[in-house]
Amino acid sequence: MRRGSAAPSGVRGEARCYDADEAVTTAADLRAAAFLKVVTWARVALVPVILALILAGPENEAAFNIAAVLFAIAALTDFFDGLLARRWAQTSVFGNFLDTTADKLLVAGALIGLLVVGRVSPWIAVIIIGREILIIGLKGAVASTGDLVRPSVWGKAKANLQFLA
């Protein structure tokens, strides 16, 4: 709970969702936190694999298809790990930052690969990647002060539209 809050630890109040001060103590909490970290780090690990497959695509059409499937899986893990983190009350400042960073790496990696093989316009890639870098920098600056930029429904909608595009 947030400092100064009188709600019991079993009550899921508004502050619980983004409060990194409360310790993860039960075995179930530890398993949930570990699972969510693995899912997010797996999404980060898929970025170079997807990029390599996109780059191999011009010589091997199946590589484009495999890259598309892996990208779709990574996009789905973004949806489910956020949903599960909120449901299991396992969200934190670091988890929020890592999740949005993984999303941005996934989109930027795919765009760079598609740009190299000539499947996306350079100006579109520059605008989208430039925006992602700006946002991650601003979020990092805010996080360094100990504050949090909470994800909004519009940010998630934007990410989902990028994943679908």
Image: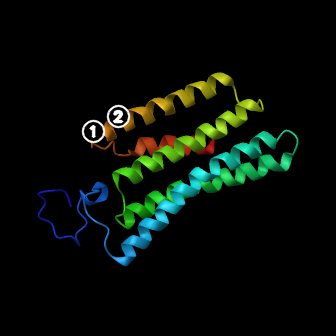
Q: For the point 59% across and 40% down, which residue is it?
A: 107
- Can see residue 10? yes
Q: In which quadrant of the rendered image does the N terminus lie? A: bottom left
User: In this figure, what is the number of numbered marks?
Assistant: 2
- Can see residue 75? no
Q: Is residue 122 rendered to the left or right of residue 75?
A: right
Mark 2: give few (<14), some (14-19) or many (20+) Cα within 10 Å: few
Residue 78 lies, in percent from the top left, at: 52, 54
Residue 73 lies, in percent from the top left, at: 63, 57
Looking at the rendered structure, which numbered label has been put on residue 137? none
Please give the residue where the numbered disc 1 appears in the rendered image.
145
| Cβ atoms under marks 1 and 2 closer than 8 Å | yes
Residue situated furthest right in the rendering: 59
Element assignment for label 2: helix
Disc 1 to disc 2, how far (Cα)? Answer: 7 Å
Residue 109 lies, in percent from the top left, at: 63, 39
Residue 12 lies, in percent from the top left, at: 25, 66
Q: Is residue 10 rendered to the left or right of residue 106?
A: left
* Image position of 132 with respect to 148: above or below: above
Residue situated furthest top in the rendering: 123
Q: For the point 44% across and 36% down, which residue is it?
A: 136
Element assignment for label 1: loop
Q: Which color scheme does this rendered protein use?
A: rainbow
Q: Nearer the viewer, residue 46 or 111?
A: 46
Q: For the point 27% across and 43% down, which residue is it?
A: 146
Mark 1: give few (<14), some (14-19) or many (20+) Cα within 10 Å: few
Please give the residue where the numbered disc 2 appears in the rendered image.
141
**Residue 76 sits in quarter:** bottom right
